[in-house]
Image (cartoon, rainbow, N blue to C red):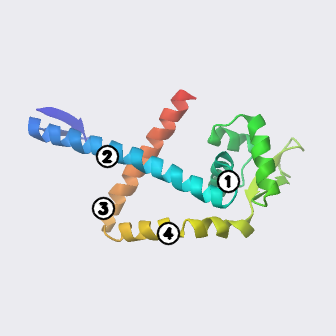
Amino acid sequence: MSSVASSDGVPYVAGRADARQRRRLTTAIKESMRDLGNQLTLLNHHVGSRLEIKDIDFDCLEVINRYGPISPSTLARRAGLHPATMTGVLDRLERGGWITRDRDPQAVDRRAVTVRATRDRVGEVFHLYAGMNASMDQICDRYDDAELQVLADFLQRTTRAGRAATDDLA
């Protein structure tokens, strides 16, 4: 018999056949997550290309949309970029009308700025993701609330694991 930790931390005890099946399922999940990551990277690349935004600029715009207003240094940390690189990214996004840089009136350093996404252009991004969003809605419709909660928990834990692994390598 082998013991494997379940999602709630309680070990799941399985026989040999069950353990082999569980390893196969775990491997299938990991492979599917890699495939999903690759597919989403490709989708993001195509969306960015349609918008005429470099991949790294588009990644930063996504961080700004999700967590902004945000300081350039915090953005650089979240995006895993050197601050000097961030200046060029922000310059390109600002020239394209995607962001604004505003002085932070509460900052001790008068040079401090916050970066915000401009609401005028957000619709362009949402429009290009409409097909994927509709597909996701259809997929989610096939699950009941309890199953969706398990999926949401799994994805949140996986995201945290990915963030920790990234931090370990940084």
Query: Between disc 4 and disc 2, whose residue precedes?
Result: 2
**Residue denoted by label 2:** 29
- Residue 167: image x %, image y %? 54, 32
**Residue at 10% in and 39% down:** 17
For disc 2, the neighbor class at 10 Å (few under 14, some 14 to 19, many from 20) is few
Q: Amino acid at mark 4?
A: Gly
- Residue 14: image x %, image y %? 13, 39
Label 2, label 1: how far apart the Cα atoms are: 29 Å
Label 1, label 3: how far apart the Cα atoms are: 32 Å
Q: Where, by quadrant of the figure, is residue 127 drawn?
A: bottom right
Label 3, label 2: how far apart the Cα atoms are: 16 Å
**Residue denoted by label 3:** 147
Mark number, residue 131: 4
For disc 3, the neighbor class at 10 Å (few under 14, some 14 to 19, many from 20) is few
Q: Where, by quadrant of the figure, is residue 117 drawn?
A: bottom right
- Residue 101: image x %, image y %? 82, 53
Is 101 left, or right, of 142 in this rendering?
right
Query: Between disc 3 and disc 2, whose residue precedes?
Result: 2
